Amino acid sequence: MPSPALSSSASSGVPWSALARLIRLPNQTGTYLLLLPTMWGLVLAARGIPPPHLLAIFIGGSFLMRSAGVIMNDLADQSFDRQVTRTKIRPLASGELSRHHAMMLLSALLVMAASLLFFLRPIVTWLAPVAAFLAALYPYSKRWIHIPQAMLGIAFGWGTVMAWAAVRGQLEAPVWCLFGATAAWAVAYDTIYAIQDQEDDRRIGVKSAALYFGSSVHLGVGLAFGLMLAFLTTAGWLAQLGWPYYATLLGVAIFFLIQTDQLRRPITPTHAFDMFRNHVWVGVAILAGLLAGVLA
């Protein structure tokens, strides 16, 4: 017997339940990980609480672009997803949802995201196509490079660049440090995330940092953590932030050491996913530290 949700979708002609799962509506961890670095950029550029309209635009934009990004990912990886235990139940991979419906939703999300640019400085409009290009390129990078997580990091980091430009109308040295920190951070947490699919990825020939680092995954992730902290420290120094910011980075460094030590031993997919989700709180802590450092 079909579920009530599927029956309702079928009767209305629009597969709402499948569309919601396509954009990962029940799980917004990815949205938070995209949003938080943009909040870092807004706070540091504004030297405090940013204007409310910019907060609203970047919160909405992060949701729209992350949703668009996962659709691009699922369209590109449909054949791969069917062969991976964790992803074979996704709406496109399982055949529950057609590519036509996915493309329609993707187009709507991109149009809505583009409409937000009318409320931002012209420089952000010039930067926006790069963000869309990076989001479209990332799903294919796992076919070409051994650390596709780096492409994800560049894509997420570009949101920080756009946020800074939205406040200040120009790009200055601290924002490139935030960009580098975001890129390194994404390599670290997405490598942990990729541990869930190591065996399936190896079997079907998909590249990932988890496979590339192998038994040295703790070293690869630890290096990415170190680069992130170095970039964040430099950003704080350039922006002349107060001591609360550096105290926050010390706490984050301790957390990173704990996770790196955990990766020395084999971990289960469930443990890897829990470690990945905990990085939302890392982003929140850094945001609070930035705000405290600005106001100190």
Image (spheres, rainbow, N blue to C red):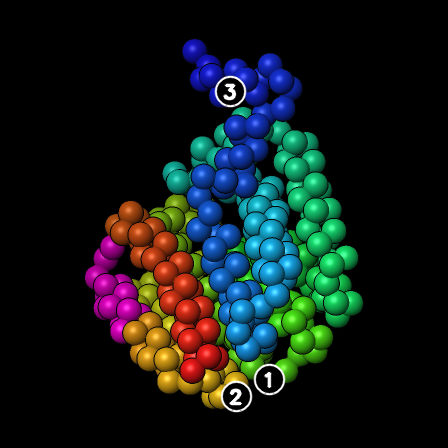
Relative placement, left or right, of 18 versus 86 is: right
Judging from the image, what secondary structure is the residue with disc 2 in? helix
Judging from the image, what secondary structure is the residue with disc 3 in? helix
Q: Circle 3 is placed at which residue position?
A: 6
Q: Which mark is residue 140?
A: none
Q: Residue 238 carries which label?
A: 2
Q: Please state which of residues 178 and 133 is positioned toward the viewer in this rendering.
A: 178
Q: Please give the name of the residue rendered at 53% of the width and 74% of the height, measured from the top-left corner.
A: 48
Q: Which SS does the magenta portion mostly show?
A: helix
Q: Please give the name of the residue rendered at 27% of the width and 73% of the height, measured from the top-left corner.
A: 254
Write down the region rendered in magenta.
253-267
Decide if residue 193 is in sight here.
yes
Of label 2 and label 3, which has the lower sequence position? 3
Decide if residue 158 is in sight here.
no
Image quadrant containing the N terminus = top left
| C-alpha gap between disc 2 and disc 1 | 8 Å
Of label 2 and label 1, which has the lower sequence position? 1
Q: Residue 167's spot in the image, x, y percent?
A: 65, 71
Q: Please state which of residues 120 and 114 is positioned toward the viewer in this rendering.
A: 120
Mark 1 or 3: in front is 1
Quadrant assignment, res 221 = bottom left
Q: Residue 256's spot in the image, x, y percent?
A: 31, 70
> Label 2: few (<14), some or many (≥20) within 10 Å?
some
Q: Are marks 2 and 1 in contact (CB under 8 Å)?
A: yes
Q: Which amino acid does label 3 sit on?
A: Leu
Q: In this view, does 261 lie above or below 210?
A: below
